[in-house]
Amino acid sequence: MIQYKDLSRQITIIENELDGYEEILSQLNTSVGAKVIGITGPPGAGKSTLLNALISELCIKHKVAVIAVDPSSPFSHGALLGDRLRMMQHHNNSNVYIRSLATRGVLGGLSAKTMEVADLCRNAGFDYVFIETVGVGQSEMEIVSLADVTVLVLVPESGDDIQAMKAGIMEAADMYVINKHDRDGADRLFLHLSNLLQMHHKPATILKTSAINNEGILQLLSMIEKALENPNENTLLDKVYLRVMHLLYGQCRKKINSLDFRHQLEEEIKSGNFNIHKFVKNIRF
């Protein structure tokens, strides 16, 4: 049985980089474990409601972990929304574990430690790990490298937003959900999405749902299962590569003393012969 208190304590250690966090991570087998499903999309698309419906179906027979990434409070740097408000109906379910992570100013739709926390949950005995991003549209590309399957949730009113999104997450998602399909414009959005995906030579994996009415949820689960059963090996390599690069960037940031670095930058600028490209090239870690 999964000990949720122990898991919560380990997540806190990892998220805050307390003593022992590197040892916890180094003992994980990141090539096995639960599959990770990313739920992303713009604010107001109904991601949390859709995720609630998916959990309700899965938790009957499976153990499910949810990592909900929330905007940070500018004062406490903690999550503003929080799991207990978003998914109260599953709070006391022994088959469901929910943890909120704050972005803490990190762009990309995820928290700085989402990858590490997801790896921990993958190894904790769950059958599925869901990650719900903060909901910032096309900048949420990091979820694509982290999740085995990425679901982009849209609503009929999203039609005008797609033009801005298509260069990013629109092209990278594995499947597309038009939630709240009873609203005007759902059919038009479906056609628009189909044409867009055809232009980019992607399979038109599009589904209409109404999460609040539990419509289309079983079909979505079937689509997710099918995608998990048939992974693309080249895509898998790309995902692992992006994750490694993300961790390397994090290691580089740690090796830079921000105060010393700022002072060095200030002196270079004052010299009157400052070249930003040469400066960056000469940085030693």
Image (cartoon, rainbow, N blue to C red):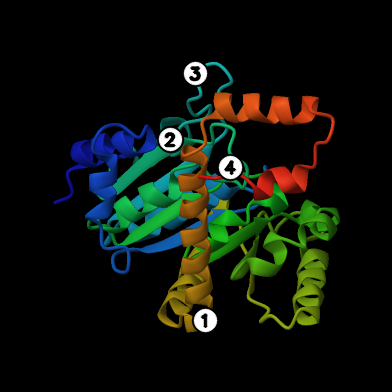
Check disc 4 and report the residue beneath it.
134
Q: Is residue 121 above or below residue 217?
A: above
Q: Position of residue 5 (x, y in %)?
A: 21, 36
> What crowding class fits label 2: few (fewer than 14 Cα within 10 Å), some (14-19), or many (20 or more)?
many
Residue 29 visible in the current orientation:
yes
Name the N-terminal-most of marks 2 and 3. Answer: 3
Q: CA distance from mark 1 to mark 3?
A: 41 Å
Q: CA distance from mark 3 to mark 4?
A: 17 Å
Name the N-terminal-most of marks 3 and 4. Answer: 3
Name the N-terminal-most of marks 4 and 2. Answer: 2
Q: CA distance from mark 4 to mark 1?
A: 28 Å
Quadrant position of residue 228: bottom left
Quadrant position of residue 127: bottom left
Identified by mark 4, the residue type is: Val
> What crowding class fits label 1: few (fewer than 14 Cα within 10 Å), some (14-19), or many (20 or more)?
few
Name the residue at 48% across, 53% down.
248
Which numbered marker is on residue 83?
2
- Point out the residue furthest to the top here: 75
Q: SS at mark 3?
A: loop
Check disc 3 and report the residue beneath it.
76
Name the residue at 46% across, 52% down.
247
